[in-house]
Amino acid sequence: MFKVPWASALLVAALVAVYAFSSGGNWYPDVVTLSQNAFGAQNPLALLFYVGYHLGVQHLAGNLVPLVFFAVLLESAASGRHVVAVFFLSGFLAALAFAFLSPGSLLAGASGGVAGLMAAGALVRPKVAAVLLLGVPLLSMFVVLPLLDAATSSSFSQMEVKAEALEQRAADLEERGQAVEAEEARAEADRVVVSLEEQKQARAKEASAQPDFWVHLAGALAGALYAVVLLPGLVEDGFDELSRFLFGGGSGGKK
């Protein structure tokens, strides 16, 4: 019987909503907003919500794509409450590991929680998870991220054209003696230029950021431990499924 993946949809909607808030409707978030909500020694309270904040739209998409597939996989095998619990527990423990190993750095993004969902999903549905582990990175690398890169580049080009058009309008207005209107057009052009530079800087910062291996590992271990402790029957079935697939036998797992 088909189950509506309400928890998976809720997580996706929450991450998109937080990103929309932090970016103000732009492609990239405001640097101040991001630093205030990233987790680190200077901002320990962000441990409660840092998973919702991302460096940029590609960072967000890089987490959303695997989250969608593995959250739905785990939810179809277990339940929505397990999906939510794995995601936040894994994100929580990944942040603690990060704080211990990188005390002077800031952490943002849902990668720890996503790693936990991937590990839990792999234990309860190993055959499907194996396909996803191969297919999802390819989907992200060759489809989703290139499309987003093209879209952001196009948006930046449009902002440049808009700024040039406003500057030209200001010059035309000055020639006609409309000084007040010219000043308004030039001020608008300056705002577009400033916004464009901020977006470009945020894009460059996102591009230079490196994934943290220990965050992913801690998140994955947390998700795996959750599945082993709280979903032992499903994990047993998963090993039985994998055994039959690899060796043509079974472990007599629970059905």
Image (tube, rainbow, N blue to C red):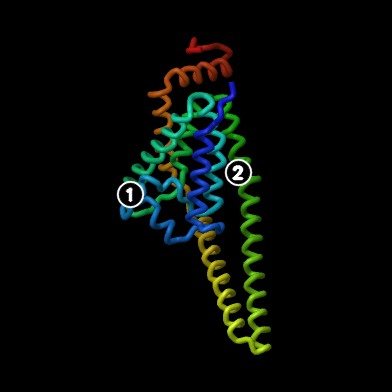
Relative image position of residue 186 (x, y in whole percent): 59, 79
Task: Residue type at mark 1: give it.
Answer: Leu
Element at badge 1? helix
Nearest to N terminus: mark 1 or mark 2: 1
Closest to the observer, 168 or 96? 168
In screen coordinates, is 68 left or right of 107? Answer: right
Structural crowding at the residue carrying mark 1, measured as other residues with C-alpha within 10 Å and reported as few (<14), some (14–19) or many (≥20): few
Task: Residue type at mark 2: give it.
Answer: Ser
User: Who's the residue at 41% across and 37% down the image?
Assistant: 90
Structural crowding at the residue carrying mark 2, measured as other residues with C-alpha within 10 Å and reported as few (<14), some (14–19) or many (≥20): some
Relative to residue 212, is residue 132 depicted above or below? above
When asked about the image quadrant of residue 164, the answer is bottom right
In screen coordinates, is 85 left or right of 250? Answer: left
Element at badge 2? helix
Q: Nearer the viewer, mark 1 or mark 2?
A: 1
Relative image position of residue 252 (x, y in whole percent): 49, 10
Residue denoted by label 2: 140
Closest to the observer, 43 or 247? 43
Residue denoted by label 1: 45
Relative to residue 246, is residue 112 depicted above or below? below
When asked about the image quadrant of residue 66, the answer is top right
User: Can you name the residue that lies furthest to the top here?
Assistant: 252
In screen coordinates, is 244 left or right of 91? Answer: right
Relative to residue 237, is residue 115 depicted above or below? below
